[in-house]
Image: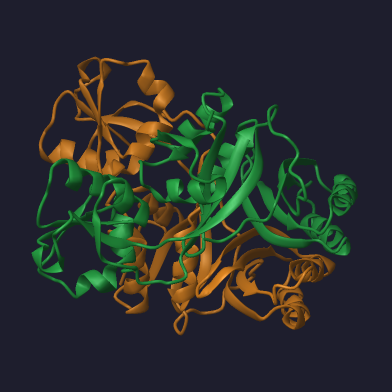
Chain colours: A orange, B green
Amino acid sequence: MSPKIAIQGFEGSFHQIAARHYFGTDITFATCATFSEVVRQVTSEEVDCGLMAIENSIAGSILPNYNLLQQANLRVTGEVYLRIRQHLLMLPGQSLTDIREVHSHPMALLQCRAFLREHLDWRLVETEDTALSAKNIREQHLTGTAAVAGSLAAELFDMDIVAEDIHSDDQNYTRFLVVERAEKAKPVANANKASLYFHTDHQQGSLAKVLVRIADRGINLSKLQSYPRPGYTWQYYFHADLEFDDAQQLEQVLEDIAPVTDSVRVLGVYRKGETY
Amino acid sequence: MSPKIAIQGFEGSFHQIAARHYFGTDITFATCATFSEVVRQVTSEEVDCGLMAIENSIAGSILPNYNLLQQANLRVTGEVYLRIRQHLLMLPGQSLTDIREVHSHPMALLQCRAFLREHLDWRLVETEDTALSAKNIREQHLTGTAAVAGSLAAELFDMDIVAEDIHSDDQNYTRFLVVERAEKAKPVANANKASLYFHTDHQQGSLAKVLVRIADRGINLSKLQSYPRPGYTWQYYFHADLEFDDAQQLEQVLEDIAPVTDSVRVLGVYRKGETY
């Protein structure tokens, strides 16, 4: 049976594009309205895995998702990076000159502002989702209307791409984590990256001590993200991504940092992701 | 002439409460729809200072504001902490038993969910702003309608507080920064805190080196926030808040970290803020 993957967003979304790159196309999807719902479906085993965006190269970390991961009993078993490419989609046979309205999520419209500004006669309509805008155009057979969305929406809803790569920033990447229920997750072979979180005793220099021990083992800290420690005002958790060469290095560093942290939890040990 | 302060949000908002605690009541306000507009008004000298929220003890950092601060030529000259207290406001003479509708910003309604859940017959109406909801009730003389808002909205719009402190989490604090145009800002006397940002050469252990030098000078790192370095995919800036005893300590540490950072900019040197 094809694995079932919970993703945030609608059919044809960037989450679904990322999932197809990571898992291949022989999968089925549960589309979830919120990230909490992704976590709930993975936890309750309604799906095999979940895929959730954790940060974007321009907008930064999705902080609430760090909290979600911390509170849930999930394991990170992989990651995938996707370049966000926005296209202009219309019903087959329609062309740029037919456009009167452009529908999409406000963030997508913003990402394409330079292109859209060249066409001031187009009415911009903010919607809930990029792919959903394309689906609506298809279902309601809206002529004269284009959607800003990814390539998968064009494929799924049989739409034409009338303008390709209309986003302003060519270096817009999103990082997605693959999450599984902790009890079910199997160890990942040839792992070279780990995500963990910890807090320190909040004494002067306590974070420096942790980072020095990580560096001393020859491990690269690819990301350090602080976020509020629930119930402790103005104290922070740190979420760290470590890149290493072999599993022994990671085991050693976890031993090394134990005395200088108040609690360390490993969210997952996995293969560094590919970029698509 | 009273100083003029640009704040994000509407009259009666938590930004205005924080500004009155920091500057006293002999001030005038420019209310701005967005944080960008606050920065623009300070930069163009339409106002004397701006006040902007930078982080919340529960929700965490307001990441876009770190970017705004970095891109603008502003100086941080102070900070203030405010406990977020939500009340239920009605027209004078009205009472709890009259309520049919409650208006407020979705976040405020969420913060009061336990209290509101005890009154399932109240219709909850999501609005743009807490204080604006109170103002609307006053201007349209809406009986049977309450607003969730702060105490200043009650004072400004002559409303009664019919239920006090209805928020669920008693430890909900927001930190605000005071910003001025860099060329205009005067050095702050008896400063004991600094905000700076830097990036490193992204070599292994580079962040550890910076933090060790900070700790070696006896300086407390009260906050370390990473965010994307514009134009450099998956590289990060670090925004650091340092607490020190005297200005010399800060000067020394800036010299110490210069060789191990690629660029350091001091956003401001100021007095550690009070909590109200």
The residue under the point 26% across, 72% down is: B115
Quadrant that contains the N terminus of chain B? top right
Which of these two is toward me, A30 or A210?
A210
Residue B162 position in % (x across, y down): 23, 65
Image location (x, y in percent) of residue A259: 76, 83
Q: Say left or right for A94 vs A172.
A: left
Q: Above or below — where is A247 with respect to B205?
A: below
Residue B127 in percent (x, y) is at: 24, 48
What residue do we see at 31% from left, 16% from top? A120
Left or right for A53, reference A25: right
Residue A231 vertical position relative to residue A91 in the rendered view, above or below? below
Q: Quadrant of residue A136?
A: top left
Q: Is there any visible trace of residue B236 in the rendered image?
A: yes
Against A90, residue B136 (above or below) is below
Q: Nearer the viewer, residue A153 or B258?
A: B258
Question: Which residue is painted at 17% across and 23% down in the image?
Answer: A144
Q: Is residue A177 visible?
A: no
Side of B246 where B62 appears, left or right: left
Residue B187 x, y percent position in the rendering: 76, 39
